[in-house]
Amino acid sequence: MDTDQLLAAVELGGTKSIALLARGHDILEQITVPTTTPDETLSQLQNQLRTWYAAEPFSAIGIASFGPVQLQQDQPDFGCMLDTPKPNWSQARVAPVLTEPFSCPWKFDTDVNGAALAEYKWGAGKDCDSVCYVTIGTGLGAGLLIHGTPIHGAMHPEVGHIKTRRAEGDSFGGACPFHGDCIEGLVAGPALAARFNADMRTVPDDHPVWQNVAHDIAELTATILLTTSAQRILYGGGVSTLRPFLLPMVRERVVKNLGSYLPFLDAQSAEEIIRPPALGNEAGPRGALALSMAALEI
């Protein structure tokens, strides 16, 4: 397959969305728009795709979206948003709006599955059979790849709504509108704002509540290790990026809790397994590009 074909990709995020045009692996143009209402956001993205297509038709579109989304192709709402905590986005026709004007193949998946695929192809997941990409930002989501293939079943994994063991003495009720103190309701951006009663970016690193946050992320990490045996667990998203001191705290707790049980886990291996994405902020948009390539089986 010709890897110099013109490709389009869209990463739909909870706060901002990105459309890009690439020739093979090389990104030629990229625009960013705020994620507001479905009508406004999807129209802006579609208009940009139309502009690029009119200048030179692209060969495929990859769409990586926040979720939950319908990935079952035999369902009438395939490519649409399911019930989501993000206001006004439930049942939004994401893939139909972005693909219907164009005569080319397309592939649709979650933003975290896309990011996991990008890290598997070009980043920290290279040479690994199993990769889990976790983003902690406006929400919390995780994508899981086995042998380079995103895992789907009845739907995509909904790791953000797992309930984990709470830290002793932590009475925070959680911020998830569906489940209260699921892991998203404990450590995602809105949860941290509620925990601290402040923008988490203004909270000092030595605030004692960060210990509870690290405990909660460590519990999630242990759950992922025990259920998937992932060779890489990559933490991206705004919370992980803005508070890098959390990851060493998480590793320490995971090794303390599981190191005597899992033979592959110790302080040294934890640094390789539990780490930031190598692609940084590019994991998301490059994940959408990886999906565009997958639509053509490049």
Image: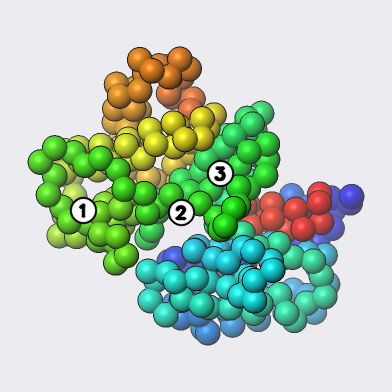
Callout 2–callout 1 Cβ contact below 8 Å = no
Is disc 1 placed on a helix, strand or loop? helix
| Separation of marks 2 and 3 at Cα, in angstroms | 11 Å
- In the rendered view, does 201 fall on the left or right side of 17? left
Residue at screen point 71% across, 62% down: 107
Specify which label sits upstream in the sequence, 2 or 3. 3
Q: Which residue position is annotated with label 2? A: 158
Identified by mark 2, the residue type is Glu
Identified by mark 1, the residue type is Thr
Image vertical order of residue 234 relative to residue 155, above or below: above
| Separation of marks 1 and 3 at Cα, in angstroms | 32 Å
Specify which label sits upstream in the sequence, 2 or 1. 2
Q: Quadrant of residue 73?
A: bottom right
| Separation of marks 2 and 1 at Cα, in angstroms | 30 Å
Residue at screen point 77% across, 58% down: 295
How packed mark 1 is, by other alpha carbons closer than 10 Å (few <14, some 14-19, many 20 or more), is few
Q: Which residue position is annotated with label 1? A: 202
Q: Position of residue 163 (x, y in %)?
A: 31, 48
- In the rendered view, does 94 fall on the left or right side of 267? right
